[in-house]
Image (cartoon, coloured by chain):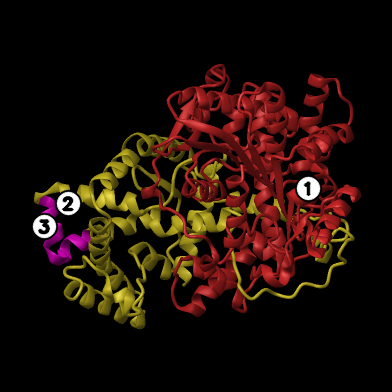
Chain colours: A red, B yellow
Amino acid sequence: MLSPLRITALLGALLLGLSGRVVAADIDAATYGYPLTNPFEATITSTPADLRPLLPTDLEIDQKDYSINLRPEREHELPDNFWAVKKLHYRLAQQDRPAPLIFIIAGTGASYSSSTPEYLKRLYYSAGYHVVQLSSPTSYDFMAAASRQATPGYTPGDAEDLYRVMQAVRAQHPKLPVTKYFLTGYSLGALDAAFVSKLDESQRSFNFSRVLLLNPPVNLLTSVRNLDRLVQTQVNGITNNRTFYELVLAKLTRYFQQKGHVDLNEALLFDFQQSPQRLSNEEMAMLIGTSFRFSAADIAFTSDLINRRGLITPPGYPIYQGTSLSRFFARALQCDFDCYMYDQLLPSWERTTKGTGLAELARQSSLTALESYLKESDKIGVMHNADDLILGPGDIGFLRRTFGNRLTLYPLGGHCGNLNYRVNADAMLEFFARG
Amino acid sequence: MAKFLCLLPLLFSAYAFADTTSSTLPAAPVGGDGFTNPLSTLKFNPGLDQREFERASLNALDVYDPLESWNRRIYHFNYRLDEWVLLPVVNGYRWVTPGFVRSGVTNFFSNLGDVSNLLNSMLQLKGKRALNTTGRLLFNTTIGVFGLWDPATRMGLAKQSEDFGQTLGFYGVPSGPYLVLPLLGPSNLRDASGFAVDTLAESQVNYLNVSQESGRHPEILLLRGINLRYITNFRYGQLNSPFEYEKVRYVYTEARKLQIRE
């Protein structure tokens, strides 16, 4: 005979099964405990130091940078002063025993050695995995050394480039004892990871057992336009004689003068926002937007140079190690993501794939293009924030419908600001521990 | 030099300024799916056509750099030297010495550097700072055993760097053309001259006999160089941008202005 308790449990399971929907794990704001309620601050500063997980230092990690020569033709195509990016560099941290290997894909414009991939490496290394850190397909070094078209933004194409890199990385370490493969990425790297996972279903090189997407864009166009818009906020105090940077630096100077000395440490950053010189939300938004505009300028310049499009650098212009690039920088700075898409990505994509129009390009490049695959794939999980600035209305709804209980939605954190919060770190480790 | 490099991530990564007690945001309409739409809380310029990013960035590119061609070549030279010689040496140093030895070395040379910090604080008539640094020298040289430990910082006497370049800037000497020095990296005419004066002054003071002994034992100088690279976080290529030269130039220039004004 069934006890009432078991009947209820059975009923619950039935109802859940009948409704056909499993609900996302919504993390309640009260129990979450993340201290930064302002998404712009969270994005800029990430988690206060004492709330981060304890992680191994460089000395405790057996790691090395390696390089692979994937596009030997670039040796001649690229001017001499790009010598440092003619081979693709990546970082491998290895365990001294058989272990799973996790690939980490960096976000927009970011190198494998930037702070977030470094953090993720320490985290997963501490869990006993081999870790490979890869630059984003939108980063300067990846574009120059690994990308076939050197025109990133069409995600299926970027995923193919990444897949080839991963295969080359594995071929470089035939003796590394790998038990299984994991994959993760943050921001744009999370979107890349989803497409790489899809590609792996047909190519079967890695058979990833778990894939975790951290703060991916859902509709690429929405995210890109949000980022472009950040430099359009109204900032008070900008005059003909004072640019935005001068305004921020003046605040920093006043802050240091009042403090009496320059003391650069992590606590400084927190202290600064408590001072009268603290930045407003509009100023923080513009600062975040500025950092992304510099990425856009790098992408526009590098893509144009490698493909000899002549939009920024005249084709054949002699560039030696002593040649000033400042005027090309000045020109590239004028180009935001939207400009790059229209001037370079779209024409290149239309020529190579016979597709038409930005709407179609964006559709094929967004997470929504993988809806049915993501719905079926239990191995893929996603973590996102309700206050992420790269999302638009309806995006979280899509994630809920598509991932069900494989979505963990945090109430706070802005864009990737809570990745290094202890609660998130535990959840990330647990996700892979189950695989 | 090490200090300005700390400013790099500050200005060029998204991780720049922070807070624990957050400011208030106007309540945003929460969508049915839980999205709080942070951008909807911001005041935007109505036409969405301001060109402040472009104006500010072009303005920042405007650094007096008449020797740019030479500077860029030395920049590439330093980049290669760093990859092929300096970083491997630093890695070897890290490999063969235990952590407490390395921090002892760092503290020892840092204590020597306080001599020039003291001289320059006095030259700028910064009495409080001069007293602070005098206290540091006294405690670190005695209790800290010739500066191998740094008890002064724990006693609340923070290190306050002043060099002759800053002293010159304090009295209104303009920075002059931007320079990239072999081995040492970004500088300008004023700061490079300042560095020469500081080096000369140090050998005259001959504190703890180190300058004199360095003449006889060049390995002391070598250790000092290795330590300098060891404590400097900057890595060439770290900004991962084709325009790293311009960005480093701007950050160096602004960081020095900030140090002089403070």
Instruction: Report the mark closest to the observer, 1 or 2.
Output: 1
In the image, residue B17 above or below residue A19? below
The answer to the question of whether label 2 and label 3 lie on touching residues, with beta carbons closer than 8 A, is no
Q: Are marks 3 and 1 on the same chain?
A: no
Q: Residue at x 27, y 68 (%)?
A: B114
Q: Residue at x 81, y 63 (%)?
A: B36
Instruction: Report the mark closest to the observer, 2 or 3.
Output: 2
- Residue at mark 2: chain: B
Instruction: Report the mark closest to the observer, 3 or 1.
Output: 1
Q: Earlier in the sequence, mark 2 or mark 3?
A: 3
The answer to the question of whether label 1 and label 2 lie on touching residues, with beta carbons closer than 8 A, is no
Q: Residue B212 — which label?
A: 3
Mark 1 residue crowding within 10 angstroms, few (<14) / some (14–19) / many (20+) = some
In the image, residue A140 above or below residue B190? above
Q: Nearer the viewer, residue A117 or B221?
A: A117
Kind of residue at disc 2: Ile
Q: Which residue is mark 1?
A: A223
Say which element carries label 3: helix
Q: Residue at x 61, y 61 (%)?
A: A423
- Residue at mark 1: chain: A
Q: Residue B8 — which label?
A: none
Q: Residue B220 — which label?
A: 2
Image quarter for residue A156? Answer: top right
Q: Is residue B54 magenta?
A: no
Q: Position of residue A177 (x, y in %)?
A: 45, 30
Q: CA distance from mark 3 to mark 1?
A: 62 Å
Q: Is residue A338 left or right of residue B136?
A: right
